[in-house]
Image (cartoon, rainbow, N blue to C red):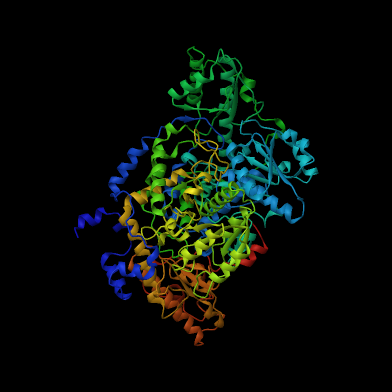
Amino acid sequence: MNEDFIRRKFYFRHIGPSLEEIHKMLKILKCSSIKELINKTIPKEIRLKKNLILPNSISEYKYLNHIFRISKRNKVFRSYIGIGYKNTVTPAVIQRNILENPNWYTPYTPYQPEISQGRLEALINFQTMISDLTSMKISNASMLDEGTATADAMFMIYKESLRRKRIKNDPYFFVSDEIFPQTFSILKTRCFGLGIKLIQDSHGKLKKYQKKDIFGLLLPYPSSLGEIYDYTETVKYAKEKDVSVIVSADLLSLTLLTPPGEWNADVVVGSTQSFGIPMGYGGPHAAFFSTREKYKRFLPGRIIGESVDRKNKKAFRMALQTREQHIKRERATSNICTSQVLPAIMASMYALYHGPKGLKIIAENIHKWTKKLENELTHTVNGIEQINSFYFDTLRIKIKKPEIFSLEKLKKVAERRRTNFRYLDFHHLTITLDETSCEEDIHHILSIFHEVNNHKMERNTYKFKKNQEEKYKIPNSLRRRSNFLTHSIFHKFHSENELMRYIKRLERKDLSLTHSMIPLGSCTMKLNASAELFSLSQYEWRNIHPFVPKDQTKGYQFIIKNLEKYLKEITGFSGISLQPNSGAQGEYAGLMVIKAYHHSLQEDKRNVALIPSSSHGTNPASAMMAGMKVILISTKKDGSIDKKDLFKKVKENKDFLSVLMITYPSTHGVYESHVKEIIEIIHENGGQVYMDGANMNAQIGLMKPEKIGVDVCHLNLHKTFAIPHGGGGPGMGPICVASHLQPFLPDHPFLQNEKNKKTLTVSSSPYGSPLILTISYAYIRLLGPDGLRKCTEISILNANYIKEKLKNDYKILYVGKNDTVAHELIIDCRIFKSIGIEVIDIAKRMMDYGFHAPTISFPVEGCMMIEPTESESKEELDRFIETLINIRKEIKEIEKGQFSEKENVLKNAPHSLDLLTDNKWIYPYTREKAAYPLNWVKERKFWPSISRIDDGYGDRNLICTCT
């Protein structure tokens, strides 16, 4: 094969094994070709007969030129729209060293704290920042976006009210009529699923509804129109009536405003986008969620807590995990799996870089320019008035004399001058300033208004009077007087050198794909190619507000339209929504689509979700959030769905059956041959079939979900389609649906001129996190149909190669009828319990070899699920295999009595540098055995920064902020 041709084909860069290595692995598997392996693995009746119809692959060079040209179709206007999204400045030191750094964007969620201390520390900084600014006791480590954080807050207090029997028959939730429109739409969707009734009115009219059973109240601070209200009387009345108070707050404004925690709020939510995170046409951005300590066991999402390791060294870990979906399943506090770790870390570094004084100066400057704009507008423009009594960064302009000042003319002039305002109706608009605003912006806005007034404007037409310059447009009673960000961490890193070195110190503590493969089953930790990521830093993609007119986003519309087309072709479905912001949110969205479909047929009683016991924990958690009743289906010894149990429960729930949720291939790593039969039974009994897309990396180009009868599936773009995991987010979870479900796909209040308006909204922005959609678009264009199919084939090859090499040392728990696995496999570690070795001990010991452990105890307790992906070379697979085989030898040493069950190299793993350099060595094996168990480890050594963490101590002594 021509060498130049090979170099130009991207899949030879993306796929790990070389052609020679592929032949060697096939020989070990006793297969003459990849085709033979696939035929043995995937049932014939579901295999595709034709190739995918997609554009052919292009080289990285051609792709980068292509995406650059597409970006120029976007028009970057000056946007003063606000409503939760603002221009901001990403400090270059943060962009260069975090956003563009694979050591930060390629790790997984920090389930293994000993090799995740860097991002765990950054996240505890984030939690401290949020707790301080909101004046709440506890914060989590980020949410998907502000709207879903608000819905999760409502859900939390709803569940807590049910638990203490506060709610009777008819639950109501009260929402201020000045909340963000996108947030209200998300709340409507959540309430539709749960049977909660919404009241939307002025906060001052809460007493009017005293006969309603209102369990919660949502207040904006400041409001979406910019007004700052003193809610003292409203909150006092709510507390008297046992109504929980949720506040949706502007984080930067809380440097100047009295924090909600000081006026008795129960939950505070919002977005950290203004802390240096680009708008990106809507995301990704990290939302925040802070609350009172009494809610700590009900808090959604991840919580980072402080603990100690075995040497009593301070360490961080994910705390209170027993309340999360992967353990509590349908009884979980939320369905959150992926959140927004990378944007949260960037926001925390923004706070470290500026410190409390810097943040306050930024907020004061914004407020100063907003005041100046108000004064200049009201004194130099005829026919308008500014009607907000108090504000932080947003003016509300009323057209009081349309014959003098025409709003229609303003729209035309503003568009010609490449400027966006928020137009409320025929007589009102708002103008929101931000961190980037300066005198030039003031002059620019004024010149537009003056042109509408038909007179020329001179610079500095109106001068501040001294008392106006000094006067805050914030109520004196709501001026912040408490200190914030007082911990020393927020006072150390104000120079670029110091922040850069701090970022690097944290970075060195974390294992990522830059060190070794991360073989987490069901997580698909594949290569995130550099060429796919360049667009994240490009001006035309980063700086567009999500609610601008579509003719300003033709670049984005091109990407969205084509990505939708490609994903529909890959899955076989006719409808798609890119709105869901994570895989779990995709599950929820898919279930809500099914719920809406059943309601359209007047089959409201269909609310039963049948879910295999082996499913990912998000499945039952999402079903519960959609207001469904979860019934578990057992699995057989070979890992397949127990058809007898399924058919029995289908028959018992025939009139109430809503959906069967399946994963394919199964979470046990096999292609079930009777999947079509199962789907037909569900359809015959009035139900729909939802496919979890977690294992889509074993389908692309070889089979399509729609062809086997599935009605809806979600895709994890952060798994299958190369969006980096970011240490726990961002992600994307679009849903694809069959034609009969297409009318019920999620919609959004800011999508203009769309037909058949629906009520389902699941994300704050219309397309979830559009900035990172460019990554998945790049992945498909670079690979093309042949490359995509090859990725699936090699992921199956790599998994089967590992199976074959490990089968003499570990029991392979599940295989297909031809003794093959799909793209992942499960090894059984339960046998080692007889000598006191748990699966967690093997996981910790792998760190000493430089590897992140596979997924442990899911889907089977005491086992490991291994997914190598297509991106790993044979050389890397062999190191991983040798690691597990050598650990098996270490276990045999315990079995033979060479080491005790309590004192051995596994029980004491991982061995940190502190442990190994201690003057006193008390262990029955050598330091070399602990640190360098195989020769190649010396050249590739990754040092865990702490020894084994004490999980119990961290939960017993919960500390979730910097100490």
Q: How many marks?
A: 0
Seen from the viewer's position, the closer of residues 275 and 356 is: 275
Q: Quadrant of residue 375?
A: top right
User: Residue placed farthest to the front in the image?
Assistant: 684
Q: Classify the position of the C terminus by image quarter.
A: bottom right
Residue 22, above or below 85 = below
Q: Classify the position of the N terminus by image quarter.
A: bottom left
Q: Position of residue 85 (x, y in %)?
A: 53, 37
Residue 424, above or below 145 = above
Seen from the viewer's position, the closer of residues 49 and 747 is: 49
Q: Quadrant of residue 422?
A: top right
Q: Position of residue 838 (x, y in %)?
A: 55, 75
Q: Position of residue 316 (x, y in %)?
A: 57, 60
Residue 213, above or below 313 = above
Residue 588 in view (yes/no): yes
* Residue drawn 43% across the image and 48% down it: 574
User: Residue placed farthest to the left in the image?
Assistant: 2
* Residue drawn 62% across the image and 40% down it: 184
Seen from the viewer's position, the closer of residues 595 and 198 is: 595
Image check: 277 left or right of 628?
left
Q: Position of residue 767 (x, y in %)?
A: 48, 43
Seen from the viewer's position, the closer of residues 940 and 674 is: 674
Residue 847 in view (yes/no): no
User: Residue placed farthest to the bottom in the image?
Assistant: 896
* Residue drawn 53% across the image and 33% down it: 434
Image check: 731 left or right of 951?
left
